[in-house]
Image (cartoon, rainbow, N blue to C red):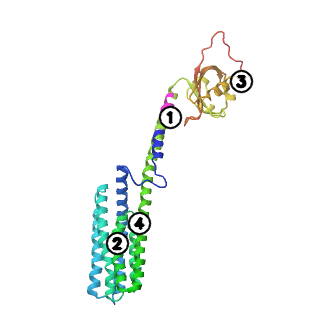
Amino acid sequence: MITELKSAVTTAPSRRARLKNLSRVESVKLKVERAALLFRGAPTAIVISIVNAIITGIVAWSAVSHSVLLPWIGAVILLASIRAGVWLRFRFSRVSGRAMSRFARLHVFFMAINGALWGALAPIFAVYGMLSHAFLPFVIAGMAAAAVISAGASWRAVLAFNLPLLAPLAATYALALGENGLAISAVVVLFAGATAYLALSVQKMIDRSILLHTHNAALFDAIQKQADEAHIAEQRFRALVEASHDVTIIFSPEGRVTYASPSVETVFDASPEQLIGKTTKDIVHADDISQFRAVGEKSLSTLGQAVQLDHVCMKGGEGEYKMLAGRLTNMLYVPGVEGFVFNGGLLKEEPHRRLHAVP
């Protein structure tokens, strides 16, 4: 268990997670998780594209020729419908890592076509004298930002959309508006660089989250495995103790009884429950208490060390003392025990050995 925990902790990614030289398993995990995030964000991107196309049509209806505007709107909606169909096909098919990878490749392809359609809006507005309209940069910037939000798990997907979207806009401003256009074009280029950097940063952050989740899962599995093993070991220990005729009593570091085996009822004529909570003073004879504590102190030197007790007088309830012999073992740092364990049985009285007088 300790080895597994050390492995899980030492291989966990640091704050600056190592995204290069990943193992094959980690690389596949990243690709599949990215694809799954793209899959979840695809419906949002599709809806945004359709809604913005309709809004664009309403804004440009009176200025742009319908023979140009309607085919553009139709192409955007048709592409969105195809993307929705592809998404639904994968949605109701068997989910697998390979299927998610295929969807990711198709998604990037569709993002590039969609970016080209929206990039064509700049030349259309320029031809019909709407290039200076405030709506154009607003809707283009909105679509670029939406790409980062919906497809931020894949920097390539964002780049595939934003490059054909913003390049025509920058070129159109530079060619159509003279010196002012060059300044606006420079701003568009800066915006394109900012969105690309943002998309790359988002992807790195998502990669770190995926790796952290993977290593946390490994750590949790190791802890869960150890907990299961400890539970099984505890059940085995209790089964052995409860089936034994020897007396087993666990004393806390303060000297209070935290566990007594069922065999105490036979030896002391008292139930285990009657011993729980009692102290060494309550159950160990006064003449043997100093010896008992000395043995306990001796066992402190080594975890798990068993110190022999040749004889000790104990009683369970209000009955008489019984002479026992056994071992006292230090198990203070053993989970589930956390105390001193006395294990022993009745000592056959020899003719020359007399029991302590009952006070």
Q: Label for residue 340?
A: none
* First to last magenta residue range: 235-240
The crowd level at tag 1 (other Cα within 10 Å; few <14, some 14-19, many 20+) is some
Q: Amino acid at mark 2?
A: Leu
Q: Earlier in the sequence, mark 4 or mark 2?
A: 2
Between the C-alphas of marks 3 and 2, the distance is: 90 Å
Q: Earlier in the sequence, mark 3 or mark 1?
A: 1
**Residue shown at the point (33%, 69%) measured from the top left:** 160
Which SS class for mark 2?
Answer: helix
Indicate yes or no whether the magenta region holds residue 236: yes
Q: Main secondary structure of the magenta part?
A: helix
Q: Kindly identify the amino acid type of the residue bearing the numbered disc 4.
A: Ala
Sequence-wise, the earlier of marks 1 and 2 is 2
Q: Quadrant of residue 86?
A: bottom left
- Left or right, 46 with respect to 14, comes to left
In the foreground, 245 or 228: 228
* 4 or 3: tag closer to the N-terminus: 4
Place of residue 336 in the rendered image (x, y in percent of width and height, measured from the top left): 55, 36
* Residue 306 horizontal side relative to residue 255, left or right: left
- Visible in this render: residue 96? no
Q: Secondary structure at mark 1?
A: helix
Q: Which residue is mark 2?
A: 163
Q: Which residue is mark 3?
A: 286
Where in the figure is residue 48, as x and y percent of width and height? 37, 74
Q: Is residue 355 above or below residue 85?
A: above
In front: mark 3 or mark 2? 2
Give the residue type at disc 3: Ala
Q: Which residue is mark 4?
A: 199
In the rendered image of this protein, does residue 188 appear above or below residue 310? below
